[in-house]
Image: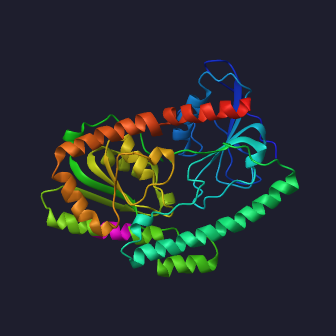
């Protein structure tokens, strides 16, 4: 389907016309999007991706490009060597069927399967359940790739070019732009805000029943984190702990998002447990606000390598981790400074756009 024509967006630097669309409903007309207008947000993800796109196109001298924001690894409205797709929230490590038919795909979750093996020993029911879920994901991925290869063959698409699949950070989701609160002036010691439940209304019936009665990695890991945080808080009444539990991820409105941003900006330690997928927006959102981020997983992508991230093997270890952090205020300040620098230099939309822009130039020149 040819997308509904949109007014060309002109890159301020060079006058080149590009096109930008959000397409989440297969068969429906894609929604035109202007990444240079901060109020034009067809999806919350577009705030971060807009910064990526603007950085990509700064000084761009190649052909006009068409950008799609999608969650579908098997369909785009159009393909061609001028098309760049942002593939969001694909936790199955899937290689898009259209990868060989476009200039590049920038995906927010890793395209390489990985699992936090450090969480497996000593063996716990929680980690074994997560491993079982991971094996299910790998089986789903294998079936998808068989179908994707058939799609590509039927369409006559060429094999993907080396470097056409680019991993980018999750960035932030509904997190407002706020003035930075100095680390020493923050009023909350430890903060988690979010959901511990998973939307069980989606998927096949057997999956819905299993998630509802047996649990899923999101609810299991986050409930373990909540229990550990409540235990630590009871043992340390002198510390200010803020725990705000909400409905599932999709139910968060703008008011709740603003409150989440205010609370995170006011905290020293931000907890980032895994959710439905292994990676969490909270890691990047914590870095963006200069928090000390404690998480249970870090992926194999370059933007995690050497990052200022405090990893726990199990949320049962949270007591020792927090005790160690608050016993060393100097280390916490250094971690906060490192978080801000890591966001600015590695994970911000501007930094990611520079890396992606270089890759697109290389692919265009090949």
Using the image, determine if residue 286 lies above or below residue 11.
below
Kindly identify the residue that appears in the image at 78 percent across and 45 percent down: 101
Give the color scheme: rainbow, by chain, secondary structure or one colour: rainbow
Kindly identify the residue that appears in the image at 57 percent across and 72 percent down: 135
Residue 26 shown left or right of residue 44 in the figure: right
- Foreground pick, 270 / 10: 270
- What is the x, y in percent for residue 88? 59, 51
Using the image, determine if residue 117 lies above or below residue 159.
below
- Foreground pick, 148 / 256: 148
Magenta stretch? Answer: 222-227
- What is the x, y in percent for residue 69? 64, 45
Residue 13 seen anywhere in this rendered image of the structure: yes
- Image-quadrant location for residue 245: bottom left
Kindly identify the residue that appears in the image at 71 percent across and 25 percent down: 62
- What is the x, y in percent for residue 221? 40, 68
Using the image, determine if residue 332 lies above or below residue 217.
above
- Foreground pick, 294 / 117: 117
Magenta span: predominant SS is helix
Does the stretch in magenta take in 253? no
- Quadrant containing the C terminus in the rendered view: top right
Residue situated furthest top in the rendering: 14
Residue 3 shown left or right of residue 302 in the figure: right
Residue 77 seen anywhere in this rendered image of the structure: no
Residue 221 shown left or right of residue 241 in the figure: right
Residue situated furthest left in the rendering: 238
């Amino acid at each position: 389907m040819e997308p509904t024509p949109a007014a060309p967006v002109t890159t301020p630097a060079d006058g080149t016309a590009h096109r930008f669309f959000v397409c989440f409903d297969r068969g429906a007309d894609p929604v035109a999007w202007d990444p240079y207008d901060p109020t034009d947000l067809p999806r919350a993800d577009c705030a971060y991706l807009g910064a990526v796109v603007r950085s990509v196109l700064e000084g761009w001298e190649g052909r006009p490009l068409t950008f799609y924001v999608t969650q579908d690894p098997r369909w785009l409205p159009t393909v061609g060597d001028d098309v760049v797709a942002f593939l969001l929230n694909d936790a199955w490590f899937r290689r898009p069927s259209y990868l060989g038919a476009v200039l590049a795909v920038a995906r927010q979750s890793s395209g390489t399967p990985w699992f936090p093996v450090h969480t497996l020993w000593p063996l716990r029911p929680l980690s074994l359940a997560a491993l079982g879920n991971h094996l299910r994901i790998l089986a789903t991925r294998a079936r998808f790739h068989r179908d994707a290869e058939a799609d590509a063959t039927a369409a006559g698409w060429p094999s993907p070019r080396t470097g056409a699949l680019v991993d980018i950070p999750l960035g932030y989701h509904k997190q407002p732009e706020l003035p930075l609160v100095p680390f020493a002036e923050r009023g909350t010691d430890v903060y988690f805000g979010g959901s511990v439940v998973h939307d069980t209304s989606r998927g096949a019936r057997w999956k819905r029943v299993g998630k509802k009665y047996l649990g899923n990695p999101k609810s299991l890991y986050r409930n373990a984190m909540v229990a550990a945080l409540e235990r630590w808080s009871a043992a340390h009444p002198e510390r200010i702990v803020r725990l705000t539990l909400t409905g599932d991820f999709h139910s968060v409105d703008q008011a709740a998002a603003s409150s989440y941003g205010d609370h995170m900006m006011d905290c020293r330690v931000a907890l980032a447990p895994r959710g439905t997928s292994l990676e969490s927006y909270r890691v990047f959102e914590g870095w963006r606000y200069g928090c000390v981020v404690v998480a249970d997983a870090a992926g194999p992508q370059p933007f995690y390598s050497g990052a200022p991230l405090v990893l726990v093997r199990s949320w049962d270890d949270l007591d020792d981790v927090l005790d160690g952090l608050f016993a060393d205020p100097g280390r916490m300040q250094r971690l906060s400074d490192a978080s801000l620098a890591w966001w600015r230099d590695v994970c911000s939309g501007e930094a990611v756009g520079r890396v992606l822009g270089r890759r697109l130039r290389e692919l265009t020149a090949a």
